[in-house]
Image (spheres, rainbow, N blue to C red):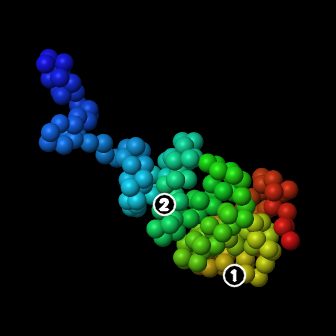
Amino acid sequence: MRLVLALMMLPGLALADAFGTTNPEELTMNKVLEDIDAGRTSMTNCAAGYLMTKSGRHGAARKTFEACAGDGYPGAMTWMGYLDNNGFGGDYDPDAAAEWDRRAAEAGDSVGQFNYGLSLLRGYGVPQDEATGRALIDAAARTGLPIAQRLQSAGYDPEAVTPDADNWRYAPMN
């Protein structure tokens, strides 16, 4: 009995009894993943995917961003592109990365416009189409996206925004 009372007094410990769970998890990665598994996406759950990927939990980030992208969050689509472009939590897949960025661009996301525009300029993951790529970068620049404005002012030279890129990676695919 003493042990049960002592455990009940510990702060932060979730205990289940006949009345339900006392002190359930909130604002934790476990809670976010529980919500995602239950099909509950939200702006905060989707934003948690950023912390997951930056902490190296790429599988959890992929699961979170996939659910959020499926529910129409354009920012999650650009993060899916990032994961696919780098092989985090799945295979390296430039075609899938470009597709996620295309979807985000079509949803009006300026980062998606920039990323997909840059892919089109390079022919990376998609057939090269410089005119459409420039138009998308221009659209992103009009929103005030600094990297898009920098690429415009550099005459659309990708080296201006990715000077340390592995150029072999960005060789045109057509």
**Horizontal side of residue 95 vs 18, given as left or right:** right
Q: How many marks?
A: 2
| Residue type indicated by callout 1 | Ala
- In the image, residue 101 lies at what x, y percent? 63, 68
What residue is disc 1 on? 135
Q: Quadrant of residue 136?
A: bottom right
| Residue type indicated by callout 2 | Ala
Secondary element at tag 2: helix
Q: Quadrant of the N terminus?
A: top left
Q: Quadrant of the C terminus?
A: bottom right
Q: Quadrant of residue 78?
A: bottom right
Other-residue count near label 1 (Cα within 10 Å), few / some / many at <14 / 14–19 / ≥20: some
Q: Quadrant of residue 148?
A: bottom right
**Horizontal side of residue 124 vs 54, given as left or right:** right
What residue is disc 2 on? 67
| Residue 146 seen by the camera | no
Position above or below: 93 against 4:
below
Cβ–Cβ under 8 Å for marks 2 and 1: no
Mark nearer the viewer, 2 or 1: 2
What's the CA distance linking mark 2 and mark 1? 29 Å
Position above or below: 54 against 14:
below
